Image: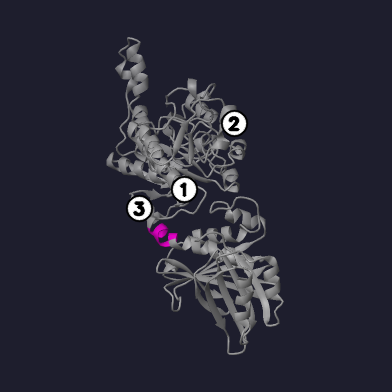
Amino acid sequence: MRILVAEPLAAEGLELLRAHHQVDELIGVPRERLIAAIPEYDALLVRSQVQVDVELIAAGTRLVVIGRAGVGVDNVDLDAATRAGITVVNAPTGNTIAAAEHTLALLYALARRIAAADASLRRGEWKRSQFTGAELRGKTLGIIGLGKIGQAIADRARAMEMVVIGHDPYVTAEQAALRGVELVDFETLLARSDVVTVHVPLTRSTRGLIGAAQLARMRSGAFLLNVARGGIIDEAAVADALREGRLGGTGIDVFEHEPPTGSPLLDAPNTVLTPHLGASTAEAQVRVAVEAAAQVIDVLEGRPARYAVNAPLLTPETAQAIAPYLPLAETLGRFFAQFCRTGVKTLTLEVAGDLAAFDVTPLSAATLRGLLETATTERVNLVNAAHLAKSRGITLVERKTPDAGAFSSLVTLSGESKGRTTTVAGTIAAGELRLARLNDYWIDMAPSPVMLVTRHQDRPGTMGRIGLMLGEADVNISAMHLARSAPRADALMILALDDEVPDEVAAAIRAHEAVLDLWVIRLGGER
Protein backbone atom coordinates (compact mmCIF):
# COMPACT_ATOMS: atom_id res chain seq x y z
CA MET A 1 0.00 0.00 0.00
CA ARG A 2 1.08 3.61 -0.54
CA ILE A 3 0.82 6.17 2.25
CA LEU A 4 1.13 9.93 1.76
CA VAL A 5 2.26 12.03 4.74
CA ALA A 6 1.28 15.64 4.07
CA GLU A 7 2.42 17.29 7.33
CA PRO A 8 5.42 16.81 9.64
CA LEU A 9 5.19 13.56 11.62
CA ALA A 10 7.50 12.34 14.38
CA ALA A 11 10.18 9.94 13.17
CA GLU A 12 8.76 7.13 15.30
CA GLY A 13 5.45 7.32 13.43
CA LEU A 14 7.17 7.35 10.04
CA GLU A 15 9.31 4.35 10.99
CA LEU A 16 6.23 2.39 12.01
CA LEU A 17 4.50 3.15 8.70
CA ARG A 18 7.58 2.30 6.63
CA ALA A 19 7.91 -1.04 8.38
CA HIS A 20 4.61 -2.07 6.75
CA HIS A 21 4.04 0.02 3.61
CA GLN A 22 5.56 2.49 1.14
CA VAL A 23 5.60 6.02 2.55
CA ASP A 24 6.07 9.32 0.70
CA GLU A 25 6.23 12.79 2.26
CA LEU A 26 4.79 15.87 0.53
CA ILE A 27 5.07 18.57 3.17
CA GLY A 28 4.42 22.24 2.55
CA VAL A 29 3.62 21.76 -1.13
CA PRO A 30 0.95 23.82 -2.95
CA ARG A 31 -2.55 22.42 -2.66
CA GLU A 32 -2.71 21.78 -6.42
CA ARG A 33 0.25 19.44 -6.18
CA LEU A 34 -1.33 17.55 -3.29
CA ILE A 35 -4.58 17.09 -5.25
CA ALA A 36 -2.61 15.89 -8.28
CA ALA A 37 -0.69 13.34 -6.20
CA ILE A 38 -3.45 11.92 -3.99
CA PRO A 39 -5.04 9.56 -6.60
CA GLU A 40 -1.96 7.31 -6.28
CA TYR A 41 -2.30 6.72 -2.54
CA ASP A 42 -4.28 4.38 -0.27
CA ALA A 43 -3.81 6.40 2.92
CA LEU A 44 -3.30 10.05 3.85
CA LEU A 45 -1.81 11.35 7.10
CA VAL A 46 -2.23 14.98 8.17
CA ARG A 47 -2.13 17.13 11.29
CA SER A 48 -4.14 20.36 11.57
CA GLN A 49 -3.16 22.54 8.61
CA VAL A 50 -3.98 20.55 5.47
CA GLN A 51 -7.69 20.90 4.65
CA VAL A 52 -9.00 17.49 3.65
CA ASP A 53 -12.17 18.77 2.02
CA VAL A 54 -14.61 17.46 -0.59
CA GLU A 55 -12.25 18.29 -3.46
CA LEU A 56 -9.26 16.48 -1.98
CA ILE A 57 -11.34 13.47 -0.92
CA ALA A 58 -12.92 13.20 -4.37
CA ALA A 59 -9.45 13.18 -5.92
CA GLY A 60 -8.34 10.37 -3.61
CA THR A 61 -10.03 7.59 -5.54
CA ARG A 62 -7.83 4.93 -3.90
CA LEU A 63 -8.04 6.30 -0.37
CA VAL A 64 -9.02 3.77 2.28
CA VAL A 65 -8.07 5.72 5.40
CA ILE A 66 -7.28 9.28 6.47
CA GLY A 67 -5.23 9.65 9.65
CA ARG A 68 -5.19 12.81 11.74
CA ALA A 69 -2.21 12.96 14.10
CA GLY A 70 -4.03 14.81 16.84
CA VAL A 71 -7.38 15.06 18.61
CA GLY A 72 -9.67 17.21 16.48
CA VAL A 73 -10.73 16.37 12.95
CA ASP A 74 -12.29 19.70 12.00
CA ASN A 75 -9.90 19.97 9.03
CA VAL A 76 -11.36 16.74 7.59
CA ASP A 77 -14.78 16.66 5.91
CA LEU A 78 -16.24 13.65 7.72
CA ASP A 79 -19.43 13.55 5.66
CA ALA A 80 -17.50 13.45 2.38
CA ALA A 81 -15.13 10.80 3.74
CA THR A 82 -18.00 8.66 4.99
CA ARG A 83 -19.85 8.87 1.68
CA ALA A 84 -16.64 7.78 -0.06
CA GLY A 85 -16.21 4.85 2.32
CA ILE A 86 -12.98 6.23 3.78
CA THR A 87 -12.22 5.55 7.44
CA VAL A 88 -11.04 8.61 9.37
CA VAL A 89 -8.91 7.98 12.46
CA ASN A 90 -7.40 10.36 14.98
CA ALA A 91 -5.13 10.19 18.03
CA PRO A 92 -7.30 11.33 20.94
CA THR A 93 -5.09 10.20 23.82
CA GLY A 94 -1.59 11.06 22.69
CA ASN A 95 -1.62 14.76 23.62
CA THR A 96 -3.89 14.63 26.69
CA ILE A 97 -1.17 15.44 29.21
CA ALA A 98 0.47 18.03 26.97
CA ALA A 99 -2.79 19.93 26.49
CA ALA A 100 -3.67 19.72 30.19
CA GLU A 101 -0.26 20.98 31.26
CA HIS A 102 -0.34 23.81 28.71
CA THR A 103 -3.76 24.89 29.99
CA LEU A 104 -2.41 25.11 33.53
CA ALA A 105 0.72 26.88 32.28
CA LEU A 106 -1.47 29.61 30.80
CA LEU A 107 -3.46 29.78 34.03
CA TYR A 108 -0.32 30.23 36.15
CA ALA A 109 1.02 32.80 33.70
CA LEU A 110 -2.19 34.82 34.08
CA ALA A 111 -2.46 34.44 37.83
CA ARG A 112 1.13 35.59 38.40
CA ARG A 113 1.26 38.03 35.44
CA ILE A 114 4.40 36.34 34.20
CA ALA A 115 4.39 37.54 30.59
CA ALA A 116 3.87 41.19 31.53
CA ALA A 117 6.46 41.02 34.30
CA ASP A 118 8.99 39.44 31.94
CA ALA A 119 8.43 42.15 29.31
CA SER A 120 8.75 44.89 31.94
CA LEU A 121 12.00 43.50 33.28
CA ARG A 122 13.47 43.27 29.77
CA ARG A 123 12.66 46.97 29.32
CA GLY A 124 14.95 47.70 32.28
CA GLU A 125 12.12 48.27 34.75
CA TRP A 126 11.77 46.99 38.32
CA LYS A 127 8.05 47.56 39.08
CA ARG A 128 7.29 44.78 41.55
CA SER A 129 4.16 46.42 42.91
CA GLN A 130 2.53 46.47 39.47
CA PHE A 131 2.66 42.70 39.14
CA THR A 132 0.99 41.46 42.29
CA GLY A 133 -0.57 38.14 41.42
CA ALA A 134 -3.32 35.92 42.79
CA GLU A 135 -3.12 32.50 44.44
CA LEU A 136 -5.10 29.71 42.81
CA ARG A 137 -5.67 27.69 45.99
CA GLY A 138 -9.31 27.96 47.00
CA LYS A 139 -10.39 29.44 43.67
CA THR A 140 -13.13 27.78 41.61
CA LEU A 141 -12.18 26.27 38.27
CA GLY A 142 -15.03 25.66 35.82
CA ILE A 143 -14.27 23.05 33.14
CA ILE A 144 -16.50 23.01 30.07
CA GLY A 145 -16.10 19.52 28.60
CA LEU A 146 -15.08 16.61 30.80
CA GLY A 147 -13.36 14.44 28.24
CA LYS A 148 -9.84 13.07 28.65
CA ILE A 149 -8.22 16.52 28.73
CA GLY A 150 -10.87 18.01 30.99
CA GLN A 151 -10.48 15.10 33.39
CA ALA A 152 -6.69 15.44 33.41
CA ILE A 153 -7.04 19.14 34.26
CA ALA A 154 -9.51 18.31 37.03
CA ASP A 155 -7.05 15.86 38.60
CA ARG A 156 -4.28 18.45 38.61
CA ALA A 157 -6.50 21.32 39.77
CA ARG A 158 -7.59 19.30 42.80
CA ALA A 159 -3.94 18.78 43.65
CA MET A 160 -3.61 22.58 43.49
CA GLU A 161 -6.43 22.75 46.08
CA MET A 162 -8.85 24.42 43.70
CA VAL A 163 -12.59 23.85 43.81
CA VAL A 164 -13.53 22.11 40.55
CA ILE A 165 -16.93 22.29 38.88
CA GLY A 166 -17.76 21.09 35.38
CA HIS A 167 -20.36 21.08 32.64
CA ASP A 168 -20.76 18.28 30.11
CA PRO A 169 -24.15 17.04 28.85
CA TYR A 170 -22.68 13.60 28.12
CA VAL A 171 -21.30 12.97 31.60
CA THR A 172 -23.34 11.89 34.63
CA ALA A 173 -22.99 13.47 38.06
CA GLU A 174 -21.67 10.14 39.35
CA GLN A 175 -18.94 10.02 36.68
CA ALA A 176 -17.92 13.60 37.42
CA ALA A 177 -17.82 12.93 41.15
CA LEU A 178 -15.27 10.16 40.59
CA ARG A 179 -12.89 12.92 39.45
CA GLY A 180 -13.83 15.19 42.32
CA VAL A 181 -15.87 17.43 40.01
CA GLU A 182 -19.26 18.89 40.87
CA LEU A 183 -21.43 18.71 37.76
CA VAL A 184 -23.45 21.91 37.17
CA ASP A 185 -25.39 23.49 34.34
CA PHE A 186 -23.70 25.90 31.95
CA GLU A 187 -25.12 29.10 33.45
CA THR A 188 -24.14 28.06 36.98
CA LEU A 189 -20.60 27.29 35.87
CA LEU A 190 -20.21 30.75 34.34
CA ALA A 191 -21.57 32.46 37.45
CA ARG A 192 -19.52 30.53 40.01
CA SER A 193 -16.12 30.16 38.35
CA ASP A 194 -13.04 32.25 39.00
CA VAL A 195 -11.49 30.49 36.00
CA VAL A 196 -13.36 29.07 32.99
CA THR A 197 -11.52 26.67 30.70
CA VAL A 198 -12.97 25.22 27.50
CA HIS A 199 -12.32 21.65 26.33
CA VAL A 200 -14.94 20.78 23.71
CA PRO A 201 -14.70 20.11 19.96
CA LEU A 202 -15.67 22.79 17.45
CA THR A 203 -19.16 21.93 16.18
CA ARG A 204 -22.25 23.86 15.13
CA SER A 205 -23.44 23.88 18.73
CA THR A 206 -20.11 24.96 20.25
CA ARG A 207 -19.13 27.65 17.74
CA GLY A 208 -19.39 30.95 19.60
CA LEU A 209 -20.11 29.11 22.84
CA ILE A 210 -18.53 31.95 24.83
CA GLY A 211 -19.78 35.26 23.49
CA ALA A 212 -20.81 38.63 24.87
CA ALA A 213 -23.85 37.25 26.71
CA GLN A 214 -21.85 34.50 28.40
CA LEU A 215 -19.01 36.86 29.33
CA ALA A 216 -21.55 39.16 31.00
CA ARG A 217 -22.61 36.29 33.28
CA MET A 218 -19.04 35.53 34.42
CA ARG A 219 -17.59 36.86 37.64
CA SER A 220 -15.89 40.23 37.38
CA GLY A 221 -12.15 39.66 37.10
CA ALA A 222 -12.45 35.98 36.12
CA PHE A 223 -9.98 34.30 33.79
CA LEU A 224 -10.90 32.56 30.51
CA LEU A 225 -8.77 29.82 28.91
CA ASN A 226 -9.05 28.15 25.51
CA VAL A 227 -6.67 25.35 24.51
CA ALA A 228 -9.37 23.51 22.55
CA ARG A 229 -10.36 24.96 19.17
CA GLY A 230 -10.53 28.41 17.65
CA GLY A 231 -14.07 29.66 17.05
CA ILE A 232 -15.44 28.38 20.36
CA ILE A 233 -15.00 31.81 21.90
CA ASP A 234 -15.93 35.13 20.29
CA GLU A 235 -12.53 36.83 20.08
CA ALA A 236 -13.97 40.32 19.59
CA ALA A 237 -16.31 39.97 22.59
CA VAL A 238 -13.44 38.70 24.75
CA ALA A 239 -11.22 41.61 23.69
CA ASP A 240 -13.99 44.09 24.59
CA ALA A 241 -14.46 42.48 28.01
CA LEU A 242 -10.71 42.70 28.67
CA ARG A 243 -10.51 46.37 27.69
CA GLU A 244 -13.51 47.20 29.87
CA GLY A 245 -11.95 45.37 32.83
CA ARG A 246 -14.85 42.93 33.22
CA LEU A 247 -12.61 39.98 32.37
CA GLY A 248 -9.47 39.65 34.45
CA GLY A 249 -7.40 37.94 31.80
CA THR A 250 -7.40 35.32 29.08
CA GLY A 251 -5.01 32.58 28.03
CA ILE A 252 -5.54 31.59 24.39
CA ASP A 253 -3.69 28.92 22.42
CA VAL A 254 -6.08 28.51 19.47
CA PHE A 255 -7.68 31.06 17.18
CA GLU A 256 -10.51 31.21 14.69
CA HIS A 257 -8.00 32.02 11.95
CA GLU A 258 -4.46 30.76 12.30
CA PRO A 259 -2.15 32.58 12.26
CA PRO A 260 -4.45 35.17 13.94
CA THR A 261 -3.51 38.16 11.82
CA GLY A 262 -5.80 41.04 12.75
CA SER A 263 -7.36 39.31 15.76
CA PRO A 264 -8.62 41.86 18.32
CA LEU A 265 -6.93 39.77 21.02
CA LEU A 266 -3.46 40.74 19.79
CA ASP A 267 -3.62 44.21 21.32
CA ALA A 268 -6.04 43.48 24.18
CA PRO A 269 -4.72 43.83 27.76
CA ASN A 270 -4.07 40.98 30.22
CA THR A 271 -3.60 38.24 27.65
CA VAL A 272 -1.21 35.34 27.31
CA LEU A 273 -1.29 34.13 23.71
CA THR A 274 0.52 31.11 22.28
CA PRO A 275 0.62 29.76 18.68
CA HIS A 276 -1.38 26.51 19.02
CA LEU A 277 1.14 24.81 21.31
CA GLY A 278 -1.24 22.64 23.32
CA ALA A 279 0.06 19.39 21.83
CA SER A 280 3.59 20.64 21.19
CA THR A 281 5.72 18.60 23.52
CA ALA A 282 8.31 16.16 22.26
CA GLU A 283 6.55 13.34 24.11
CA ALA A 284 3.09 14.19 22.74
CA GLN A 285 4.33 14.46 19.16
CA VAL A 286 5.73 10.95 19.36
CA ARG A 287 2.58 9.55 20.98
CA VAL A 288 0.12 11.06 18.47
CA ALA A 289 2.30 10.06 15.51
CA VAL A 290 2.53 6.45 16.67
CA GLU A 291 -1.15 6.31 17.66
CA ALA A 292 -2.32 7.62 14.28
CA ALA A 293 0.17 5.51 12.31
CA ALA A 294 -0.82 2.30 14.09
CA GLN A 295 -4.47 2.84 13.23
CA VAL A 296 -3.72 3.62 9.59
CA ILE A 297 -1.88 0.30 9.41
CA ASP A 298 -4.81 -1.48 11.10
CA VAL A 299 -7.29 -0.15 8.54
CA LEU A 300 -5.05 -0.91 5.56
CA GLU A 301 -4.66 -4.48 6.79
CA GLY A 302 -8.38 -5.00 7.33
CA ARG A 303 -8.52 -4.63 11.11
CA PRO A 304 -10.87 -2.26 13.01
CA ALA A 305 -9.26 0.99 14.16
CA ARG A 306 -9.37 1.78 17.87
CA TYR A 307 -10.28 5.43 17.36
CA ALA A 308 -12.13 5.51 14.04
CA VAL A 309 -14.10 8.76 14.00
CA ASN A 310 -16.70 7.74 11.41
CA ALA A 311 -16.95 4.00 12.13
CA PRO A 312 -18.09 1.95 15.13
CA LEU A 313 -15.83 2.44 18.14
CA LEU A 314 -14.88 -0.92 19.62
CA THR A 315 -13.28 -1.86 22.88
CA PRO A 316 -10.47 -4.40 22.49
CA GLU A 317 -12.73 -7.06 24.04
CA THR A 318 -15.56 -6.36 21.63
CA ALA A 319 -13.20 -6.26 18.64
CA GLN A 320 -11.81 -9.66 19.57
CA ALA A 321 -15.25 -11.22 20.03
CA ILE A 322 -16.85 -9.63 16.95
CA ALA A 323 -13.97 -10.03 14.47
CA PRO A 324 -14.62 -13.69 13.46
CA TYR A 325 -18.29 -12.90 12.79
CA LEU A 326 -17.71 -9.89 10.51
CA PRO A 327 -17.04 -12.03 7.39
CA LEU A 328 -20.02 -14.21 8.37
CA ALA A 329 -22.33 -11.19 8.54
CA GLU A 330 -21.05 -9.94 5.19
CA THR A 331 -21.60 -13.39 3.65
CA LEU A 332 -25.15 -13.52 5.02
CA GLY A 333 -25.90 -10.10 3.53
CA ARG A 334 -24.54 -11.15 0.15
CA PHE A 335 -26.42 -14.46 0.25
CA PHE A 336 -29.67 -12.75 1.34
CA ALA A 337 -29.54 -10.21 -1.50
CA GLN A 338 -29.49 -13.03 -4.07
CA PHE A 339 -31.75 -15.46 -2.23
CA CYS A 340 -34.51 -12.90 -1.65
CA ARG A 341 -34.36 -11.58 -5.23
CA THR A 342 -36.47 -8.49 -4.47
CA GLY A 343 -35.75 -5.34 -2.49
CA VAL A 344 -36.58 -5.31 1.19
CA LYS A 345 -37.33 -2.07 3.05
CA THR A 346 -36.81 -3.44 6.55
CA LEU A 347 -34.25 -6.05 7.53
CA THR A 348 -33.91 -7.66 10.94
CA LEU A 349 -30.51 -8.76 12.17
CA GLU A 350 -30.84 -11.04 15.18
CA VAL A 351 -27.74 -11.91 17.19
CA ALA A 352 -28.25 -14.79 19.60
CA GLY A 353 -26.10 -16.47 22.21
CA ASP A 354 -22.74 -15.38 23.59
CA LEU A 355 -22.28 -12.77 20.86
CA ALA A 356 -25.36 -10.87 22.07
CA ALA A 357 -23.38 -9.61 25.06
CA PHE A 358 -21.35 -7.30 22.79
CA ASP A 359 -21.99 -4.21 20.66
CA VAL A 360 -23.19 -5.63 17.33
CA THR A 361 -23.08 -2.38 15.37
CA PRO A 362 -20.11 -3.62 13.30
CA LEU A 363 -22.08 -6.74 12.37
CA SER A 364 -24.90 -4.55 11.07
CA ALA A 365 -22.44 -2.59 8.94
CA ALA A 366 -20.86 -5.77 7.60
CA THR A 367 -24.30 -7.20 6.76
CA LEU A 368 -25.21 -4.07 4.82
CA ARG A 369 -21.90 -4.18 3.02
CA GLY A 370 -22.63 -7.69 1.77
CA LEU A 371 -26.21 -6.79 0.89
CA LEU A 372 -25.34 -3.66 -1.09
CA GLU A 373 -22.34 -4.97 -3.00
CA THR A 374 -24.65 -6.63 -5.51
CA ALA A 375 -26.79 -3.51 -5.90
CA THR A 376 -24.36 -0.63 -6.41
CA THR A 377 -21.18 0.21 -8.26
CA GLU A 378 -20.08 2.43 -5.36
CA ARG A 379 -17.37 1.23 -3.04
CA VAL A 380 -19.13 -0.23 0.00
CA ASN A 381 -17.38 -0.79 3.33
CA LEU A 382 -18.01 -0.66 7.05
CA VAL A 383 -17.75 3.13 7.04
CA ASN A 384 -20.39 4.09 4.48
CA ALA A 385 -22.65 1.00 4.44
CA ALA A 386 -25.26 2.55 6.76
CA HIS A 387 -25.27 5.80 4.76
CA LEU A 388 -25.74 3.97 1.45
CA ALA A 389 -28.49 1.77 2.90
CA LYS A 390 -30.37 4.81 4.22
CA SER A 391 -30.10 6.55 0.86
CA ARG A 392 -31.81 3.50 -0.67
CA GLY A 393 -34.60 3.45 1.91
CA ILE A 394 -33.34 0.36 3.72
CA THR A 395 -33.75 0.13 7.49
CA LEU A 396 -31.84 -2.45 9.51
CA VAL A 397 -33.28 -3.43 12.90
CA GLU A 398 -30.98 -5.06 15.44
CA ARG A 399 -32.22 -7.65 17.92
CA LYS A 400 -30.29 -9.51 20.60
CA THR A 401 -31.21 -12.58 22.58
CA PRO A 402 -29.13 -14.79 24.89
CA ASP A 403 -30.89 -17.93 23.61
CA ALA A 404 -29.20 -19.43 20.54
CA GLY A 405 -30.64 -22.93 20.93
CA ALA A 406 -28.02 -25.55 20.11
CA PHE A 407 -25.52 -22.90 18.97
CA SER A 408 -23.09 -20.89 21.08
CA SER A 409 -23.86 -17.91 18.82
CA LEU A 410 -26.16 -17.53 15.82
CA VAL A 411 -26.55 -14.61 13.41
CA THR A 412 -29.87 -14.45 11.53
CA LEU A 413 -30.89 -12.03 8.77
CA SER A 414 -34.54 -11.86 7.75
CA GLY A 415 -36.83 -9.58 5.79
CA GLU A 416 -40.28 -9.55 4.19
CA SER A 417 -41.02 -8.67 0.59
CA LYS A 418 -44.26 -9.15 -1.32
CA GLY A 419 -45.77 -11.11 1.53
CA ARG A 420 -42.90 -13.61 1.71
CA THR A 421 -40.26 -13.78 4.44
CA THR A 422 -36.69 -14.68 3.55
CA THR A 423 -34.34 -15.89 6.27
CA VAL A 424 -30.63 -16.70 6.20
CA ALA A 425 -28.64 -17.66 9.30
CA GLY A 426 -25.08 -18.67 10.07
CA THR A 427 -22.59 -19.36 12.81
CA ILE A 428 -18.91 -20.03 13.43
CA ALA A 429 -17.93 -23.64 14.16
CA ALA A 430 -14.33 -24.69 14.81
CA GLY A 431 -13.26 -21.32 13.47
CA GLU A 432 -15.07 -21.76 10.14
CA LEU A 433 -18.13 -20.04 8.66
CA ARG A 434 -21.21 -22.25 8.46
CA LEU A 435 -24.61 -21.61 6.91
CA ALA A 436 -27.15 -22.79 9.48
CA ARG A 437 -30.57 -21.90 8.09
CA LEU A 438 -32.30 -21.05 4.81
CA ASN A 439 -35.90 -20.01 5.37
CA ASP A 440 -37.54 -22.84 7.36
CA TYR A 441 -34.79 -25.36 6.67
CA TRP A 442 -31.95 -25.97 9.12
CA ILE A 443 -28.67 -26.86 7.41
CA ASP A 444 -24.97 -27.20 8.18
CA MET A 445 -22.74 -26.17 5.31
CA ALA A 446 -19.72 -24.00 4.63
CA PRO A 447 -20.36 -21.17 2.16
CA SER A 448 -18.67 -21.48 -1.20
CA PRO A 449 -17.85 -18.92 -3.93
CA VAL A 450 -20.57 -20.49 -6.14
CA MET A 451 -23.59 -22.29 -4.74
CA LEU A 452 -26.65 -23.80 -6.39
CA VAL A 453 -29.84 -23.97 -4.33
CA THR A 454 -32.95 -25.81 -5.49
CA ARG A 455 -36.34 -26.25 -3.91
CA HIS A 456 -37.80 -29.37 -5.41
CA GLN A 457 -40.28 -32.17 -4.83
CA ASP A 458 -38.70 -35.01 -2.88
CA ARG A 459 -38.88 -37.67 -5.60
CA PRO A 460 -36.46 -40.53 -6.26
CA GLY A 461 -33.88 -39.64 -8.91
CA THR A 462 -34.32 -35.85 -8.75
CA MET A 463 -31.02 -35.16 -7.04
CA GLY A 464 -29.25 -37.61 -9.36
CA ARG A 465 -30.69 -35.94 -12.43
CA ILE A 466 -29.55 -32.48 -11.27
CA GLY A 467 -26.09 -33.86 -10.51
CA LEU A 468 -25.92 -35.46 -13.96
CA MET A 469 -26.86 -32.21 -15.69
CA LEU A 470 -24.10 -30.37 -13.85
CA GLY A 471 -21.62 -33.15 -14.62
CA GLU A 472 -22.42 -33.04 -18.30
CA ALA A 473 -21.61 -29.31 -18.20
CA ASP A 474 -18.28 -30.04 -16.45
CA VAL A 475 -19.45 -28.31 -13.23
CA ASN A 476 -17.87 -30.03 -10.24
CA ILE A 477 -19.76 -30.42 -6.94
CA SER A 478 -17.55 -30.02 -3.85
CA ALA A 479 -20.20 -30.40 -1.14
CA MET A 480 -23.93 -31.02 -0.79
CA HIS A 481 -26.61 -30.68 1.85
CA LEU A 482 -30.24 -31.83 1.64
CA ALA A 483 -32.99 -30.57 3.93
CA ARG A 484 -36.65 -31.55 3.72
CA SER A 485 -39.84 -30.96 5.65
CA ALA A 486 -41.14 -34.55 5.33
CA PRO A 487 -40.67 -37.61 3.07
CA ARG A 488 -41.99 -36.99 -0.46
CA ALA A 489 -42.64 -33.35 0.43
CA ASP A 490 -40.68 -30.26 -0.63
CA ALA A 491 -36.91 -30.42 -0.18
CA LEU A 492 -34.10 -27.90 -0.29
CA MET A 493 -30.78 -28.90 -1.83
CA ILE A 494 -27.67 -26.76 -1.47
CA LEU A 495 -24.65 -27.53 -3.64
CA ALA A 496 -21.20 -26.02 -3.26
CA LEU A 497 -19.59 -25.82 -6.70
CA ASP A 498 -16.05 -25.47 -7.98
CA ASP A 499 -17.21 -23.89 -11.23
CA GLU A 500 -19.68 -21.34 -12.53
CA VAL A 501 -23.08 -22.62 -13.67
CA PRO A 502 -23.76 -21.70 -17.32
CA ASP A 503 -27.07 -19.90 -17.77
CA GLU A 504 -28.38 -22.59 -20.10
CA VAL A 505 -27.62 -25.30 -17.53
CA ALA A 506 -29.39 -23.35 -14.78
CA ALA A 507 -32.38 -22.91 -17.11
CA ALA A 508 -32.46 -26.63 -17.91
CA ILE A 509 -32.42 -27.56 -14.21
CA ARG A 510 -35.14 -25.03 -13.48
CA ALA A 511 -37.28 -26.56 -16.23
CA HIS A 512 -37.15 -30.02 -14.63
CA GLU A 513 -40.66 -31.05 -13.63
CA ALA A 514 -39.72 -31.67 -9.98
CA VAL A 515 -37.85 -28.40 -9.49
CA LEU A 516 -40.00 -25.69 -7.93
CA ASP A 517 -37.35 -22.95 -7.67
CA LEU A 518 -33.64 -22.42 -8.26
CA TRP A 519 -30.99 -19.94 -7.18
CA VAL A 520 -27.39 -19.56 -8.27
CA ILE A 521 -25.65 -17.78 -5.39
CA ARG A 522 -22.29 -16.11 -6.02
CA LEU A 523 -20.41 -15.22 -2.85
CA GLY A 524 -17.01 -14.38 -4.32
CA GLY A 525 -13.79 -15.63 -2.72
CA GLU A 526 -13.53 -17.81 0.34
CA ARG A 527 -14.64 -16.08 3.51
Q: Is residue 32 magenta?
A: no
Q: Secondary structure under badge 1?
A: helix
> Which residue is label 3 attached to?
177
Classify residue 37 by image quadrant. top right
Please tell me which of labels 1 and 2 falls first in the chain: 2
Q: Mark 2 points at which residue?
A: 36
Q: Residue furthest bottom?
A: 487
Q: Exactly how many numbered labels are in the figure?
A: 3
State the separation of the CA atoms marked 1 and 2: 24 Å
User: What's drawn in magenta, residue-wise?
Assistant: 317-323
For the residue carrying disc 2, how many other residues have a C-alpha within 10 Å: few (<14), some (14-19), or many (20+)?
few
Amino acid carrying label 3: it is Ala
SS of the residue under disc 3: helix
Q: Where is residue 94 in the image (x, y as percent from the top left)?
A: 37, 40
Above or below, comparing residue 517 to residue 391 in the picture: below
Q: Residue 476 carries which label?
A: none
Q: Which amino acid does label 2 sit on?
A: Ala
Asked which quadrant contains residue 347, the reply is: bottom right
Q: What kind of secondary structure does the magenta stretch mostly adopt?
A: helix
Of circles 1 and 3, the one toward us is 1
Q: Can residue 474 be seen in this view?
A: yes
Q: Where is residue 194 in the image (x, y as percent from the top left)?
A: 39, 37
Residue where numbered disc 1 is placed: 299
| Residue under the image location 58 percent in, 55 percent down | 385
